[in-house]
Structures are given as structure tokens and as C-alpha cells.
């Protein structure tokens, strides 16, 4: 978690055995821990965003890398869209 | 008081492409010292380009905007284009006007040459910078 300090608490609760099984399976599949799966699910359910921003941009970068699109193609296409949009919004005024 | 930073679409596209100056800039602008801005036009341009070229990433981009509370400035009224017509090429005018009229402190773009820097300096407080220049100035 880098330099971010994470506080944890120990507690005892009863949870649904089937959900517990599914959480363990999910942890195995994702090669993570049961604690991570439960923390992530709780955070998601409670609307607490634990994901760092940079992950979203990194995720986009991964997909772009897989797509094999070139940087110039992406930029050129953007320029073309801008021209079209400005024309659409301002040329008829 | 937060510094208002307008981020042009070409900076977003470079940040999407790979880790580098532009993604570093986004990370810095996420700090409480700054408020990142785009305009309706830039938003539409990015969304349309993503939909065409990398549609799978759209939800990540929209999540990013939401999480970081990126401000979307209104497009300027067409009358302002006449007033500011010498500031930039026609295609870039609405973008720089949005930044100027909203009192942005910085306008970050990869295409500085498309803007009349000396004139902008006279009529607006906004500084037009490349991502590298912005990083070296802060």
C-alpha cells in the first residue's frame, strides 16, 4: 500500500456460509486474500472508494496498449472530432 | 485557493496512451492544490474519440472524471468567438475562451503553437503551457 497507513480492526461476526465459500473461491481465483475480498466488497457496498485514481489511467493505458492503436492515430482522430464539433456548434450561428 | 487548470484533450489522449509527462501531470493536478477543468467541447471530443478508437475505456474515463470532480465548463456563446477571434485557430477558440472566461490559471496543451500567446497574455491571466513546462514551473 506504499506509504499509506491502513488501520485494521479484529472482530468476530457470523456470516453466511455460502458467501464465505464464494469469497474464498474469489480470493483463490484473484490470487489475493480473503481479507482483501471482504474489504473490497464492503467498500463497494458502502460506497467507499478505495481505488486510487492512477489505477484508472493505468487501466486505460493497458487497454490502449492492447489495442495497438498508434498515438498519432488517437491524436489525429481527436483533432478531426474537434473540427467537426466546432463546426457543428459555431458555424451556423 | 486552488489553481484552476484547464486540460486540453490532446493531453488526455497522451495520458491514455502511456505513462509519461501527461499522466504525471494528471496525477499532480489531482492534489487539493489544483482544480482540473475541461469544457463541454473537450468532453464531447474525448468521449467521441474514445467511443471510436478505444470504446472499452469509456467507463474508466467517466469514473475518473467523477472521482476527481473534474469541472466541465460551459461552451462560450458564439458572440464571444468574434471578440476573441485572434486568440487562436478557429477550432481552438471555444476552448481557450472557456478557460479565459472561467479565470483559469493554466491552460495545458500539447499544441501551444495553435495559440496567440502574446495576445492571450494581454487579455487573460491564463498561462498557456505544455505539460512539460507546467511540471517544470510548479
Image (cartoon, coloured by chain):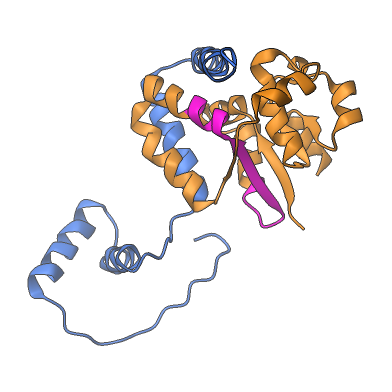
Chain colours: A blue, B orange
In this rendering, the answer to whether B113 lies above or below B39 is above
Residue at coordinates 49% horizontally, 54% vertically from top-left? A52
In this rendering, the answer to whether A53 lies above or below B40 is below
* Between B71 and B109, the one nearer to me in the picture: B71
* Between A49 and A38, the one nearer to me in the picture: A49
Report whether B97 appears left or right of A5: right
Q: Position of residue A23 (x, y in %)?
A: 18, 64
Q: What are the residue bounds of the magenta stretch? A: B28-46
Residue at coordinates 45% horizontally, 22% vertically from top-left? B49
In this rendering, the answer to whether B69 lies above or below B99 is below
Residue at coordinates 50% horizontally, 45% vertically from top-left? B65
Q: Is residue B105 magenta?
A: no
In this rendering, the answer to whether A10 lies above or below A21 is below
Q: Is residue B87 visible?
A: yes
**Quadrant showing the C terminus of chain A:** top right
Q: Position of residue B110 (x, y in %)?
A: 68, 23
Amino acid at each position: 500500500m506504499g506509504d499509506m497507513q491502513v488501520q485494521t480492526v479484529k472482530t468476530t461476526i457470523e456470516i453466511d456460509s455460502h458467501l464465505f465459500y464464494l469469497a474464498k473461491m474469489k480470493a483463490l481465483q484473484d490470487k489475493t486474500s480473503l481479507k482483501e475480498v471482504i474489504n473490497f466488497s464492503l467498500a463497494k457496498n458502502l460506497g467507499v472508494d478505495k481505488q486510487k485514481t492512477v489505477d484508472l489511467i493505468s487501466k486505460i493505458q493497458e487497454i490502449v496498449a492492447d489495442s495497438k492503436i498508434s498515438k498519432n492515430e488517437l491524436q489525429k482522430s481527436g483533432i478531426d472530432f474537434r473540427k467537426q464539433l466546432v463546426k457543428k456548434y459555431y458555424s451556423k450561428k | 485557493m486552488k489553481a484552476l487548470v484547464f486540460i486540453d484533450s490532446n493531453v488526455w489522449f497522451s495520458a491514455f496512451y502511456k505513462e509519461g509527462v501527461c499522466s504525471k501531470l494528471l496525477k499532480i493536478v489531482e492534489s487539493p492544490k489544483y482544480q482540473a477543468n475541461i469544457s463541454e467541447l473537450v468532453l464531447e471530443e474525448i468521449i467521441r474519440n474514445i467511443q471510436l478508437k478505444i470504446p472499452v475505456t469509456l467507463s474508466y474515463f467517466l469514473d475518473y472524471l467523477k472521482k476527481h470532480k473534474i469541472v466541465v465548463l460551459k461552451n462560450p456563446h458564439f458572440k464571444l468567438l468574434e471578440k476573441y477571434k485572434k486568440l487562436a485557430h478557429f477550432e481552438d477558440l471555444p476552448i481557450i475562451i472557456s478557460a479565459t472566461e472561467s479565470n483559469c490559471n493554466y491552460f495545458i496543451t500539447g499544441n501551444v503553437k495553435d495559440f496567440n500567446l502574446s495576445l492571450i497574455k494581454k487579455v487573460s491571466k491564463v498561462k498557456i503551457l505544455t505539460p512539460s513546462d507546467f511540471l517544470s514551473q510548479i
